[in-house]
Amino acid sequence: MKKVQVLLSTFNGQEYLDDQIKSLILQEGVRVEILVRDDGSSDNTIPMLIEWESKGVLSWYNGDNMKPAKSFMNLIQNSPKSDYYAFCDQDDIWDKDKLKVAVSFLEKFDDKEPGLYFSNTRLVDYNLNLIKSNKHNPKITLGSALIFYCATGCTELFNHALIEVIRKHDYVKNNSHDNWIYKVCLAIGGNVVFDEIPHISYRQHGNNYTGGNISIYDIYKQRVKNLFTERSHVREQDAKELLKGYSELMHKENIDKVERVAFYRISLRNKINLLFDKDIKEDRLSFNFAFVCSVLLNAL
């Protein structure tokens, strides 16, 4: 039976944490170990973790408030060795077969090669009432990954070969742990597989609510807004970090592709090649529209 190290980051998560942990305990077909990093909780989260630890369910440690992405990357650096690793939020509910199914996908590949699995999500409200099941079918290419965010961390499972690569480069400004490891895996020629079937109830509340009743105009507006956030040039920065940390593991074709994003603002040739790169184009017009706008306005 394969061992999966679940990496859980908590912050003031007392309301839903017990339910999430119970769903981890009920995972079938795999051996689950849970490592928790608390990101500076001030509610009852830490006493809850102490209680679960006393039952032998998990191990945990705490630290300064780093925000989710850096907290998860810290978990990667501190995780014990395992066959597979899975990111876990503090407020979702996992189906009993979530990890077993994910492992079955990655077992098809050589475990010496970096591998990553991710899936669609089932969106629910805070009472677990169904909002909708996502039916995304993302384009899994390096070009697309450099521009569009499609890998949801709480659905990801990755192998030891990939975590060893991730650990080689400490990306201190990283603000999207899930899409970062997705980009790294594709950049170095790793195996990435997507499961259209959701195996997680992804709780939507507060700022992360994703409704289904929005207009086409709202979709376009949101796509453009996402590319013009306070995280200025985050895609450009990610590309530069890929080159800095992993260029020796990348094929020439992938290096060229990453360089187009990393240096598009200072090279007209890179900008033109980027705009006409078919590897980037998505089926969804809203994504392509936002991409073209961001390139022309130097806002990747």
Image (spheres, helix red, strand yellow):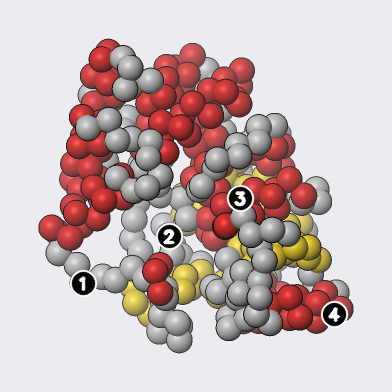
Q: Going from the N terminus, do you reach mark 2 or mark 3 first?
A: 3
* Disc 2 secondary structure class: loop
Kindly report which numbered mark, 1 or 3, lies closer to the viewer in this rendering: 3
State left or right for residue 187 relative to residue 10. Answer: left
Residue 68, horizontal then vertical, whole percent: 57, 57
**Residue at image mark 1:** 213
* Disc 4 secondary structure class: loop
**Residue at image mark 4:** 55
* Disc 1 secondary structure class: loop
Kindly report which numbered mark, 2 or 3, lies closer to the viewer in this rendering: 3
Q: How many marks?
A: 4
Kindly report which numbered mark, 3 or 4, lies closer to the viewer in this rendering: 3
**Residue at image mark 3:** 70
Q: Going from the N terminus, do you reach mark 2 or mark 1 first?
A: 2
32, 213: nearer the viewer:
213
**Residue at image mark 2:** 120
Q: Are marks 1 and 3 in contact (CB under 8 Å)?
A: no
How dense is the environment of label 1, judged by Cα within 10 Å: few (below 14), some, or many (20 and up)?
few
Q: Going from the N terminus, do you reach mark 1 or mark 3 first?
A: 3
**Residue at 65 percent of width and 80 percent of height:** 43
**Residue at 65 percent of width and 36 percent of height:** 170
Q: Are marks 2 and 1 in contact (CB under 8 Å)?
A: no
